[in-house]
Amino acid sequence: MIVAALVIERFVPPLDGAMRVADGDSFELGGTRVRLEGIDAPELHQNCGAPGASWPCGQRAKQAMQQAVAEAGKDGVTCRPVDGDRYGRSVSICQAGGRDLGALMVEQGWAVATSFAYRGEEAAARAAGRGIWSGPFEMPADFRARQR
């Protein structure tokens, strides 16, 4: 396993540089469009909550991502690409200030886990009613499908 990681790092350099947050699970880093591996955050224009009491969860997820990046300070954000997606983004595992950014977004309740890697963080966020787990919401993938 360690050998495989070294081989990947050798042929796929890490991403870093100036960052611009797009939403709760994607951003531009050093000119490369990135989507976080293993999570799915509400869409930027998605609302959550009960009818008549909805709130802009997509905007709040973006704000949480911006805050995580700001708190990283001088350490910034670095990403290790693991795949690509149909939109030309680098699907990556990223760290902000030495902390896994995907785990942080799921743990705070601003994204759902799409892989086993973050299931524990999702269970904790759900149990504590953090972020999108504070009330009813539509899964981001279902929201996107309905918008098509």
Image (cartoon, helix red, strand yellow):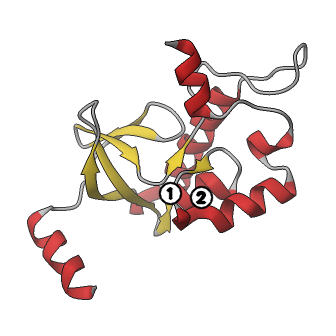
Is 61 rendered above or below residue 8?
Answer: above
Classify residue 20 by image quadrant. Answer: top left
52 lies left or right of 93: right
Can residue 80 be seen here? The reply is: yes
Give how far across and how far down residue 137 sits, in percent.
76, 32
Give how far across and how far down residue 57 sits, in percent.
70, 30
Q: Which residue is located at x 53 percent, y 51 percent?
A: 114
Element under label 1?
helix
Classify residue 90 by image quadrant. Answer: top left
Q: Contact (CB < 8 A) between labels 2 and 1?
A: yes
Q: Give the Cα separation between the discs numbered 2 and 1.
A: 5 Å
Mark 1, residue position:
101
Which numbered marker is on residue 38? none
Quadrant in which the N terminus appears: bottom left
Give how far across and how far down residue 135 sits, in percent.
86, 37
Three-letter residue code for mark 1: Leu
Three-letter residue code for mark 2: Leu
14 lies left or right of 121: left
Q: Which residue is located at x 44 percent, y 30 percent?
A: 22
Q: Hey, which residue is sitting farthest bottom in the picture?
A: 2
Give the crowd class for mark 1: few <14, some 14-19, many >=20 residues within 10 Å.
many
Q: Which residue is located at x 52 percent, y 66 percent?
A: 117
Is 67 rendered above or below residue 50?
Answer: below
Q: Hey, which residue is sitting farthest left in the picture?
A: 11
70 lies left or right of 127: left
Mark 2, residue position:
104
Give how far across and how far down residue 103 sits, in percent.
56, 61
Can residue 16 be seen here? The reply is: no
12 lies left or right of 78: left
